[in-house]
Image (cartoon, grey):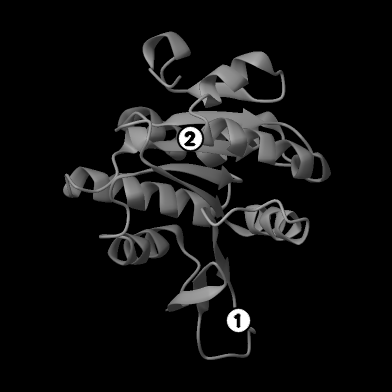
Amino acid sequence: MSQNSEKVVLFVGHRAGQLMSTLKELGMCTSNTKTLYYQGLDPLSNRDGSVFLNNEEVLCNVEYDKEILKEQLKAFFELGFKEKQFLLIGDPTEWMYQAFTEAVHSNANLFPSFAQPEDFYHAWFYPMGMIASDIRKEISALVYNVKKNGSTVFVTRKTDAALVGFIPKVIDAFEANRLIEFALQTIDLEQIVGKSKENLQLG
């Protein structure tokens, strides 16, 4: 896809949504920055939770189960991702993030006009409070999915507090078509999946 395609930044999941809220309060979000998250209801309610896109309820009465979320998200986003490039930001151990990634990759394989997997860039937060072996177990299927579909993945090990100052730099690099170059220039963002800068024309 062209470097001039519209670029969309999507904060996916609970942890990413909290970060975006902080950035929004600081006036550090643009119109192309969106958030997608799941909110459960009171346990005494007869309904399951809902999925929100930019604080607007788009799916209701959805069980917090990865496979169920994936199927619901596939249907909702079937026609919405044409001619765009996406930076997905979030914690890869969250089911919401995993379900959304699998949903958009599935749609890309089903619909030629849908944004293709190589148009999705991922910036993962290193999960806090988990040991490495547990992290690998939690995200092994997700890593296989992004590798198989040709997406590009970066990871940062910064704390949530430090992410407030760092993630806007990642977004700026993405919007300037120099995300891979930026990762090569900083120790705080590591590319773990995807083509190298030498093999990918991004700037």
Report x, y in % for residue 36: 52, 61
In this rendered view, identify the residue nearer to me: 44 or 1. 1
Which dot, 2 or 1, sits closer to the camera?
Answer: 1
Please name the residue shown 67% across and 31% down the image.
156
- Residue, disc 2: 140
Position of residue 71 relative to residue 105, above or below, is: below
Q: Position of residue 92 (x, y in %)?
A: 56, 43
For the residue labelled by badge 1, is the local secondary structure a helix, a strand or a loop?
loop
Q: What residue sits right under mark 1 in the picture?
A: 41
Amino acid at the residue labelled 2: Ser
Q: Is residue 41 left or right of residue 98?
A: right
Q: Are marks 2 and 1 in contact (CB under 8 Å)?
A: no
Apparent side of residue 99 relative to residue 76 in the rendered image (left or right): right
Q: Position of residue 27 (x, y in %)?
A: 73, 56
Q: Residues within 10 Å of mark 1 (few under 14, many from 20)?
A: few
Q: Amino acid at mark 1?
A: Leu
Dot 2: within a 10 Å radius of its alpha carbon, few (fewer than 14), some, or many (20 or more) residues? few
User: In the rendered image, is residue 126 in sight?
Assistant: no
Corner quadrant of residue 60: bottom left
